[in-house]
Amino acid sequence: MHEEEILVTRPSMPPIEEYIEELRDIWESRWLTNMGAKHRELQQRLEKYLTVQHVDLLTNGHMALELSMQALRLTGEVITTPFTFASTTHAIVRNNLTPVFCDINENDYTIDVDKIENLITERTSAIVPVHVYGNICDVERIQEIADEHNLKVIYDAAHAFGVRYKGKGICSFGDVSCLSFHATKVFNTIEGGAVCFNDRNKDFGLDIYRLKNFGIRNEECVDAVGANAKMNEFCAAMGLCNLRHVDEEIKKRKKIADIYRKAFEGTEGLKLNPIQKDVETNDSYFPVIFNEGRFGASRDAVRAKLAENNIFARRYFYPLTNTFEAFHGKYDPSKTPVALKYSREVLTLPIYAGLPPKEAARIADIVLSCKK
Ligand code: T4K
């Protein structure tokens, strides 16, 4: 038995001295939260890094989704996918909107654009697609559909930090893109998130700024029922440090992904993440789909074998959100068959910048040893 446990991910952290240096400013200014200097600086730096016109920082990716839906004044039904983290669906439901679940495509696990139009009714106000594992949605087709039917598009871009498509930051597509800067993400601010939007949505910018601060317009006027979702200075400081190293961290992830890819190449019964055309990915996750019939072992058998070796891969995303107990059987997962099948077959293997390459090779060997 190997002694040290290997988790699916470990947070990227800067040298501690770098963080302490940022903290000194906070101590001196005694400005701890409410859109302080670190918050503003990180916003500006992210706008540049992500090549988007506007970034607004929030406490987490979930609040980015929830408040974006509120700010865009969505009503009725929202088309989305169930092959995602709880947050996407919960943000819709918590806005008193009805999620209408569209299946994912078999290739890259994002929304199946050929199935969206059939789900549009006169009550539909938006599409909330999810960029999954660093794979991007078909942003061009989605925009065409949205324009034709006058729908808003809010991307859940929690997995897509820094991803570029045709040289453009992926968060410049749609009306809004929501990022997560949770500890487990490619870029973290401990907890944190952001909305990205462009000039054509200027009013959205004012609304989100207000909504993350209780709906306060000024000292005498509170004209929206907002929340408290302001990123504090300590989180923003962590972001400033991590941003300096993020390219290096993504390169290290890529190395791990390459090791897995090489080891699994041509193995019958394994489906790996596709390499999408014109996309610079961030290798945020390394999902493998296990076809039990052809590989000879189920996803759960492989997961158990890894666990015996103290390696804890995760089943992102299982169960599907449209099967959650919280919804009391309201949604029918058989209507999203591809998502349902993959949720039972997918295992995301450990991948993070600090994972030693030789451990990745060992993990791959253990996976392959399960083949019958
Ligand atoms: N949309 C999508 C598509 C998302 O994936 C997410 C978040 C969101 C929206 C919402 O964004 P946030 O509101 O979270 O900003 C984790 C994360 O908590 C969650 O942020 C993430 N998605 C999701 C995919 O993964 P869990 O429940 O799996 O977390 P947990 O605690 O089991 O941690 C995962 C692994 O990371 C463990 O093996 C331990 C390790 N870990 C974790 C933490 C917190 C560390 O090594 N250090 C740490 O500090 O949800």
Image (spheres, rainbow, N blue to C red):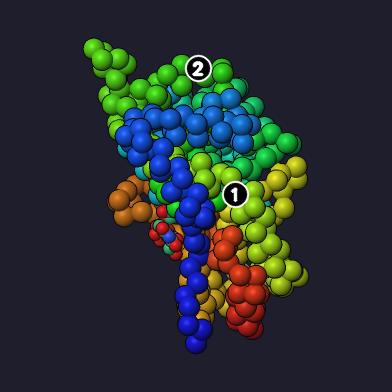
Q: Specify the amino acid type for callout 2.
A: Lys
Q: Is residue 28 above or below residue 226?
A: below
Disc 1 within 8 angstroms of ligand 1 (CB): no
Q: Which residue corresponds to the image point at 62% horizontal and 36% vertical from the top-left?
A: 49
Q: Which residue is drawn at 46% across and 16% down?
A: 203
Front residue of 113/317: it is: 317
Image position, residue 299 (x, y; %): 54, 71
The residue that mark 2 highlights is 202
Does label 1 or label 2 sit earlier along the sequence? 2
Looking at the image, residue 122 sits to the left or right of residue 213; the answer is right
Give the image location of residue 25, x and y in percent: 41, 37
| Outermost left residue | 220
**Residue 193 makes an appearance in the image:** yes
**Element marked by disc 1:** helix
Q: Where in the image, quadrant-wise, is ligand 1 located?
A: bottom left
* Mark 2 residue CB less than 8 A from any atom of ligand 1: no
Within-10-Å neighbours for mark 2: few <14, some 14–19, many 20+ = few
In this picture, residue 253 sits left or right of residue 158 = right
Q: Is mark 2 on a helix, strand or loop?
A: helix
Image point 54% across, 26% down: which residue? Answer: 54
Which residue is label 1 attached to?
245
Can you see residue 127? no
